[in-house]
Image (spheres, rainbow, N blue to C red):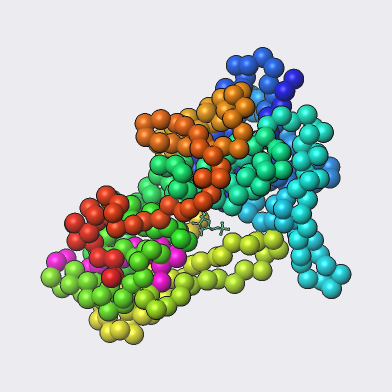
Amino acid sequence: MKRVLIITGGGDCPGLNAVIRAVVKRASQEKDWEVVGSIQAFNGILWEPTEIKVLDEHTVAGIHYRGGTILETTNKGGPFAWPVKNPDGTWGTVDRSDEMIRKINYLGIEAVINIGGDGSQQISQALFEKGLNVIGVPKTIDNDLSATDATFGFQTAVQVATEAVDKLVTTAASHNRVLILEVMGRDAGWIALHAAVAGGADICLLPEIPYDVNIVLEKAEERFVKDRGFAIIVIAEGAKPKGGTVHEIKNDEVGYENKRYGGVASELKNQLKAAGLKYDIRETVLGHLQRGGVPVAYDRVLATQYGNKAFEMVLNEEFGRMVSYRHPNIVSVPLKEAIKDYNTVDEENHLMRAARGIGISFGD
Ligand code: F6P
């Protein structure tokens, strides 16, 4: 029996289970393959005793519409930076990648399907360079991976954010207020941009375009006075004022190396008040609601195609590559290419042009 190992790493994302299910269903059509999954990304392999579980058709039945991941996940540590406590009580890291590869070989695993975002695919590439047969599957609600047209989970996040805008509109209109919605997006403002367009927001503030608070104020007041008696602002967590910095949250969780953002909506509220905004203003932080719950149909469909393709790549021994959607095809690209750049919002983007075309202000 040949074995393929599935890993889900990094932040969870609606559609992960649909990928797992598709790999298992596709593999079950081959007589000689068994699928196993490691619990909490690579931790399950590295822990003593090992925590991996066999994934068969029974295990994955009906999981395509469940959010999260049945394998659990983590965005702390990893095989190249395993947290260890120093004698003085501080935390450091050790590289356990060689030991992990030995364990994977010992377990008779022929190939690894690593489902994750940018950080996870950097790990995929590094493991591939050490000789492991790795295939990457792109995942992130932020849609910020450059070598694919889309990542699953994004449409679900956009739907949640759009519904939030719709809800804020009715309460903003009733109270004649300025309402700010803070959405996820550390480096890329795709969720904010899509939700602003779909929800009909007046102002959209992105990590890619530092904003001028006086322009935001002007636009909010214009919408308020001239048009409709309320204003809606969508702001990405990574947005910053011109000449200012992003609002980072200090995080002391062991092994957590990402930057944590959050609180920009509240900051913007204070900046607008200080700049002289006359109207009442409230903020809402959408947070992890964007990552949880049931994936929309689009994400389930994309995730299923990704899972199917990933297993086909195992059969064809296309290692060191990542599954990618290049409309209308599901293809594969070298992992190296996939981790080279971020996919961020730029002025040439058609949705950006449409947003500006319908009068959404970016505070610039
Ligand atoms: O990368 C996905 C993402 O949801 C970002 O948009 C957000 O900044 C981050 O993860 C939050 O991570 P955590 O779940 O660790 O707070």
- Residue 286 x %, y %: 44, 59
Numbered marks: total? 0
Q: Residue at x 73, y 50 (%)?
A: 79
- Residue 147 x %, y %: 46, 44
Any magenta on residue 144? no
Any magenta on residue 231? yes
The outermost residue toward the left is 226
Residue 230 in which image quadrant: bottom left
Instruction: Name the one closer to the observer, 325 or 44.
Output: 325
Q: Residue at x 66, y 41 (%)?
A: 128
> In this image, 340 relative to 169: left or right?
right
The answer to whether one can see residue 111 in this image is yes
Residue 282 in which image quadrant: bottom left
Please identify the quadrant where the N terminus is shown.
Answer: top right
Q: Is residue 291 above or below residue 282?
A: above
Q: Is residue 304 above or below residue 15?
A: above
Q: Is residue 232 above or below residue 293?
A: below
Q: Is residue 347 above or below residue 278?
A: above
Instruction: Name the one closer to the observer, 69 or 97.
Output: 97
Please identify the quadrant where the C terminus is shown.
Answer: bottom left
Q: Residue at x 81, y 45 (%)?
A: 99
The answer to whether one can see residue 200 in this image is no
Q: Residue at x 71, y 38 (%)?
A: 131
The outermost residue toward the top is 31
- Residue 196 x %, y %: 30, 57
| Boundaries of the magenta span | 227-240
- Residue 343 x %, y %: 43, 52
